[in-house]
């Protein structure tokens, strides 16, 4: 039982390689834009723009988190300038943008949340696909 669990965990770790986030960003933008066009035709311009704003916000947030993790969790010397820049971008700028979008511009919150979760769904499906297709096994 534990060997099977370790096998699943090892394959999950292998599927989350360094290129995963780059590929997920590209896929999220391409398919998100296509779905946004369909949303614009079927539901209107405001839900489609909320969808795209959620995707863009999520991708910028992931980039800030990736930068923070890369600069904080390291065995080498820390780049404090990059850490402060990432923190300055992540907290006040990103969250002020959310307030402006949801409170001032009154974009539909449900569509924004759906767009925000889209890149996470893409990452999950890409990892699950690599595990299902056994792309990371070395045997």
Image (spheres, helix red, strand yellow):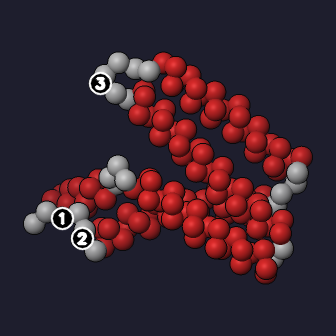
Q: Quadrant of residue 131?
A: bottom left
Give the SS element for disc 2.
loop
- Name the side, left or right, on which 99 lies relative to 37: right
Q: CA distance from mark 1 to mark 3?
A: 28 Å
Q: Earlier in the sequence, mark 2 or mark 3?
A: 3
Residue 54 picture location, percent across and down = 69, 56
Residue at left offset 66%, top offset 61%: 115
* Residue matched to label 1: 137
Report the quarter where the N terminus lies.
bottom left
* Residue matched to label 3: 75
Residue 12 visible to the viewer: no
Residue situated furthest bottom in the rendering: 42
In this view, the residue in front, 26 or 75, is 26
Residue 100 picture location, percent across and down = 83, 44
Q: Are marks 1 and 2 in contact (CB under 8 Å)?
A: yes
Q: CA distance from mark 2 to mark 3?
A: 32 Å
The residue carrying pointer 3 sits among few (fewer than 14), some (14 to 19) or many (20 or more) residues within 10 Å by Cα, namely few
Q: CA distance from mark 1 to mark 2?
A: 6 Å
Instruction: Establish if 137 lies above or below 61.
Output: below
- Name the side, left or right, on which 64 lies relative to 15: right
Give the SS element for disc 3.
loop
* Residue matched to label 2: 134
Instruction: Establish if 87 lies above or below 48.
Output: above
């Amino acid at each position: 039982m534990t060997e099977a669990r370790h096998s699943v965990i090892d394959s999950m770790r292998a599927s989350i390689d360094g290129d995963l986030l780059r590929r997920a960003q590209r896929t999220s933008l391409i398919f998100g834009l296509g779905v946004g066009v369909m949303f614009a035709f079927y539901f209107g311009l405001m839900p489609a723009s909320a969808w795209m704003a959620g995707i863009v916000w999520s991708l910028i947030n992931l980039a800030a988190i990736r930068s923070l993790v890369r600069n904080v969790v390291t065995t080498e010397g820390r780049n404090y300038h990059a850490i402060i820049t990432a923190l300055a971008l992540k907290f006040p700028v990103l969250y002020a943008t959310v307030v402006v979008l949801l409170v001032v511009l009154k974009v539909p919150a449900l569509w924004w949340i759906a767009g925000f979760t889209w890149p996470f769904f893409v990452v999950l499906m890409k990892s699950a696909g690599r595990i299902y297709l056994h792309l990371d096994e070395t045997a």
